[in-house]
Amino acid sequence: MEGYHTPLAAVFAGTITRMELEHDGTHDNIPAYNLPQNERGLVHITGRNDTPSAQRMGIAWSVRDPDGVVREAYQTWESWPYTDAGNEHEFIGGRFPFDKAGVWTIVVWLYMYPDFPTLVDSYVGDLCSVKVVVGPPEFQGFAINQYNKV
């Protein structure tokens, strides 16, 4: 049919290139291990634009504590200027406390094109393990042997 052109479908491609957990002034790769209980964490996720043109990238993640309770639900789209071809953009969430010992998990989704969000990469797995912090040596073994009711 002359004069009629079918638009090419846009192809979106991106990769999660770095996942870090900031805590106590340090950055560990995700998953991180043996974090002391009661520190505060901050998730950093970096995505790369694998298309030949600038794209607007978005991110969403959900952090769950060892009991399965959502402790951080984060989502955002990058603002102008958008990420050029082959470049990366870092997303940083909010701080939350590691107040429970055990394995914390995270689900991450990297998107492109906010008008019709297209999933380009994801991660599902452990965020970190948190260990119980034992008090100073002078309080270890501290116990109450008896008490009086008044």
Image (cartoon, rainbow, N blue to C red):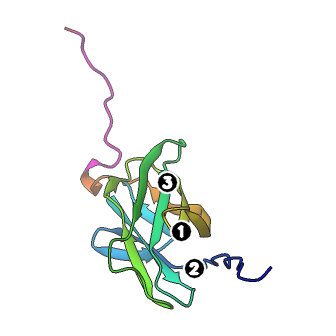
User: How far apart are the two marked residues, 1 and 2, measured between alpha carbons?
Assistant: 8 Å
Q: Which of disc 2 and disc 3 is earlier in sequence?
A: 2
Q: Which mark is residue 62?
A: 3
The residue pinned by badge 2 equals: 15
The structure residue drawn at horizontal position 24% and vertical position 14%, both measured from the top left corner, is 148
Q: Which residues are magenta?
A: 139-149
Question: Which residue has dot 1 on it?
Answer: 110
Give the distance between the C-alpha atoms of the residues marked 3 and 2, in whole angstroms: 18 Å
Amino acid type indicated by mark 1: Leu
Q: Secondary structure at mark 2?
A: strand
Q: Is residue 54 visible?
A: yes
Tell me the kind of residue under disc 2.
Answer: Thr
Instruction: Tally the marks.
Output: 3
Q: Residues within 10 Å of mark 2 (few under 14, many from 20)?
A: some
Q: Is 30 situated above or below 116?
A: below
Q: Residue 59: say if magenta.
A: no
Q: Are marks 1 and 2 in contact (CB under 8 Å)?
A: yes
**Could you tell me which residue is drawn at 61 percent across and 79 percent down?**
13
Q: Quadrant of residue 75?
A: bottom left
Residue 129 seen in render: no
Quarter of the picture holding the N terminus = bottom right
Q: What amino acid is found at the position of numbered circle 3 in the picture?
A: Ser
- Main secondary structure found in the magenta portion: loop
From what the image shows, is residue 88 above or below residue 94? Answer: below
Q: Is residue 147 above or below residue 93?
A: above
- Asked whether, in this view, residue 136 is left or right of residue 76, the answer is left
- Residue most extreme to the front: 2
